[in-house]
Image (tube, rainbow, N blue to C red):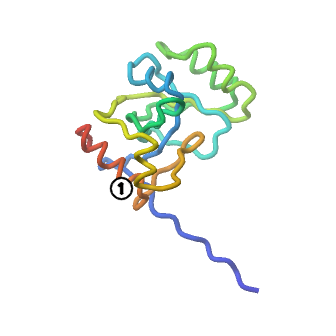
Amino acid sequence: MRRGRRLQQAPQAVTEAGAEMYLISIRPVYAYQIFRATKRFELRRNVIGRIPEGSVMIVYASGNVRAIIGEFTVGKVIEGTAEQVWRQVLSEKNHGIRGDAWRYIRGAEKAMALEVVNPVLYPRKVTLEEIRRIIPGWNPPLSYKALREGEPLYELIVKKLRRLAGLP
């Protein structure tokens, strides 16, 4: 019997400073709150994998925007049950989380809150339509995913957006 080989994944994309990079889908109302600095934590439910502090989250605004619009650095990462995460986030000053966020994470066995640090709105957004012209059939993640070196989205779009924004 022949054993299957594991495909090796390309290394995770990192900034010049060594921070891991992820693509995160966020509803437009919450995405723009992040870039207006009125929302300090982004909540996730049913989390798989850990996002380290210092990671860079590339923001895809879903809904009627459907575009990559900016990024933020992850400060504190709070993990636990929905109830534990909710209590801890609400104990933070200027958390920017509204009551409707509870409906989103309520009941999740595993939840996470990412502190938003240094949000940067890109000078130009890249729409889903534009992305699909470069990468036919591309779809954004339902929640978030690691970006990988050599991946067309990272190499052809994210790197250029970051340069346009003056980021290393």
Percent coordinates x, y for residue 102 in the rendering? 66, 19
Percent coordinates x, y for residue 21 in the rendering? 43, 46
Looking at the rendered structure, the secondary structure element under dot 1 is helix
For image coordinates 32% across by 49% down, the residue present is 159
For image coordinates 50% across by 50% down, the residue present is 146
For image coordinates 24% across by 41% down, the residue present is 164
Q: Which image quarter is the C terminus in?
A: top left
Tell which of 40 and 130 is nearer to you.
Answer: 130
Q: Is residue 165 above or below residue 130?
A: above
For image coordinates 48% across by 56% down, the residue present is 136
Q: Which residue is mark 1?
A: 155
Residue type beneath disc 1: Glu
Q: Is residue 151 above or below residue 38?
A: below
Percent coordinates x, y for residue 75 in the rendering? 44, 31
Q: Which image quarter is the N terminus in?
A: bottom right
For residue 134, side relative to residue 124 (left or right)? right
For residue 93, side relative to residue 157 (left or right)? right
